[in-house]
Amino acid sequence: MTRVAEHAARHSGALYQGTLFPSAQEQFIAEVFVSADEMGSWHRKGWLSFDPLTVADYDEKERVELLFIRGLARSGLSDAMINRMLSSLKKPYCYDPSTTSFSFVENCWISLPPERDQADVTNKYLDGRIENQDWMRCACCRARFPKLLKMPRTIVIDDKRLIEDYLPIVAISAEASREKSVRKGHISTLHLWWARRPLVACRAAVYGALVPASRFVPNGGSDEQKKSLGRANSAKFVKALCMYPGEPRTIQEAQRHILIAHADRLTQELADWKAGNMPKPGWVDEFKFSGARVTMDDIAAGRAPRPRVLDMFAGGGAIPLEALRLGCEAYALDLNPVAHIIQLCTLVYPQKYGKPDTSARGMTGPKNEKGETTWGGWPMRCATGVIGLRRGLGPRSATFIR
Ligand SMILES: C[S@@+](CC[C@H](N)C(=O)[O-])C[C@H]1O[C@@H](n2cnc3c(N)ncnc32)[C@H](O)[C@@H]1O
């Protein structure tokens, strides 16, 4: 005797609702590829709960039962075997033929779980990654299955940056080689650092990484026109920005671009969090932010975070210096203690101890009464307290001890 497994053979009579336009027998037969003779024979054997000769309108219920029985009848099993198998099921035989099958191992009908939707699987996986704040895998998932992700799970859709699209490399390189020959007032004169990168190249990299590629694209015109005009506009601005030492007005404009782009990203984070797609951004509590959107003014006034730039291999500190210049919060790391002291002198002490000197030219500034330059003398004094200098050694032969 066959038995019906608990988990199995879901009777779907209730599932199949009547259709608005049931079919006549002729049309129905054509749809299910069954002849009237076959149907009659299956009915006589007791395998159909309806009489094909008397049914006027064929509905979903008849269709499901017929497809289920069709599979069995054409399986090659003997009638006796089919009778035995059907005896454990209740009529009408409304079992989904695509998920119901007979297990000869368990000797019962089983219902396979419905095939899981790819989008459903992807989104479940993504929920787990978001819960663990595993942004790297989220990004990979987004890249591989962009069309499957539920909307409005955005994880910042279309966030292509300028550096990924276009930078006027030739002009930046030309200015970078000119900068290399500057001897006076450049931070390279603070301490020799062989691997130092040109400031203008670092400025272009930081700016290009924080500003969207769409920044300079005009609204009107064909795609081709928009692309070429956008690139021409960005080339013009980036060329002007990446001049050494740089026009304060252009640098301020660049700061504005960066803050606007960052405010948009923070606003998007808020929206994603409020829509339940992302966890609460950490900065909301950090800055006690309660608004619905972030503006450039919020960031400038310290009510929301500035963009944070980390250079883990900062060497002479060119990248974090340019990040600071462009209004970001910069972090620099290096395992070399010499690089570390150069970074302190370049990035930290000017902000901590320096006073703006409007008459100072470049970073060296005018000499004081002791013959020290404004910016050249005090790092040694400051460094003595912070990292310690070996006693008795003059500044030229000083060994820094961390
Ligand atoms: C090419 S230099 C960086 C130059 C820098 N961009 C500049 O403009 O001066 C690379 C730096 O990475 C540092 N470095 C190498 N391995 C490191 C590690 N595991 N952790 C931290 N710093 C490391 C080196 O000491 C070196 O100063």
Image (tube, helix red, strand yellow):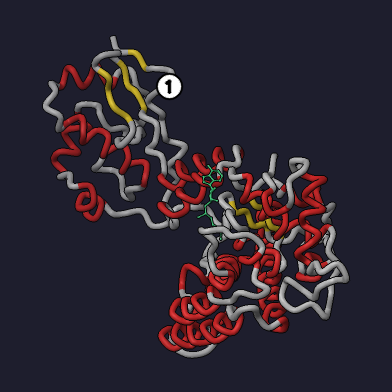
Query: Horizontally, is 362 left or right of 100 in the view?
Result: right
Amino acid tagged 1:
His
Q: Quadrant of the C terminus?
A: top right
Whether disc 1's CB lies below 8 Å from ligand 1 is answered no
Q: Nearer the viewer, residue 154 or 203?
A: 203
Q: Position of residue 275 (x, y in %)?
A: 67, 53
300, above or below 10, in the image: below
Q: Which residue is mark 1?
A: 7
Residue at image location 39% in from the left, 23% down from the top:
8
Q: Position of residue 352 (x, y in %)?
A: 83, 57
Q: Nearer the viewer, residue 391 or 59?
A: 391
Residue at image location 56% in from the left, 67% down from the top:
202
Number of other residues with Cα within 10 Å of mark 1, as a class: few under 14, some 14 to 19, many 20 or more: few
Query: Horizontally, is 72 left or right of 222 in the view?
Result: left
Count of residue discs: 1
42, above or below 362, in the image: above
Q: Secondary structure at mark 1?
A: loop
Q: Nearer the viewer, residue 143 or 183?
A: 183
Residue at image location 67% in from the left, 55% down from the top:
343
Q: Position of residue 180 (x, y in %)?
A: 53, 73
